[in-house]
Amino acid sequence: MRDLYATRRKVLSAALSAVFGERIAVDLKPGGMHLIVRYSKRADDVQLAKVAQDAGFAVEPLSRRAAAYPCGRGLLLGFTNVAETDAMHLCRQLEQAIGPELGGRGG
């Protein structure tokens, strides 16, 4: 499972970067089963997560995950259920949902 998850993590990260371009940065923490997506535009991560959730994505706002210290804005995305063959398509769908909030279109 470790190799499968490592591959899915890598493929989803690459697809996010390809679709969103410089509008986002994928914060790859070692281990875990989630990616942190940060973005340059000053958008509210709670609102962004709601828009993504309304489009069928299970994402969480990073700011709501902080227990003691602020962790900034961003989105928490799980990757373990994203098949490599679906990653690009799902990222394009996510871009359709939240792209307007981030401004412009990715690459």
Image (cartoon, rainbow, N blue to C red):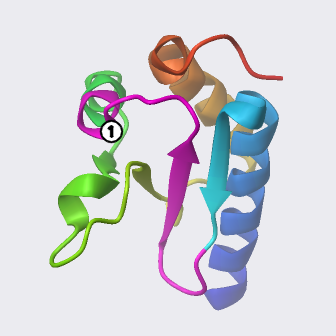
| Vertical order, 22 against 61 (above or below) | above
Is the residue marked by circle 1 packed among few (<14), some (14-19), or many (20+) residues within 10 Å?
Answer: many
Q: Is residue 75 magenta?
A: no
Residue range in magenta is 29-48
Q: Amino acid at mark 1?
A: Asp
**Helix, strand or loop under label 1:** helix
Identified at 19% across, 56% down, the residue is 64
Residue under circle 1?
A: 45
Identified at 84% across, 23% down, the residue is 107
- Count of residue discs: 1
Give how far across and how far down residue 31 sits, in percent. 56, 87
Identified at 42% across, 49% down, the residue is 74
Where residue 17 sits, quadrant-wise, is top right
Q: Is residue 17 left or right of residue 47?
A: right
Of 41 and 37, the residue lying toward us: 41
Q: Is residue 17 left or right of residue 65?
A: right
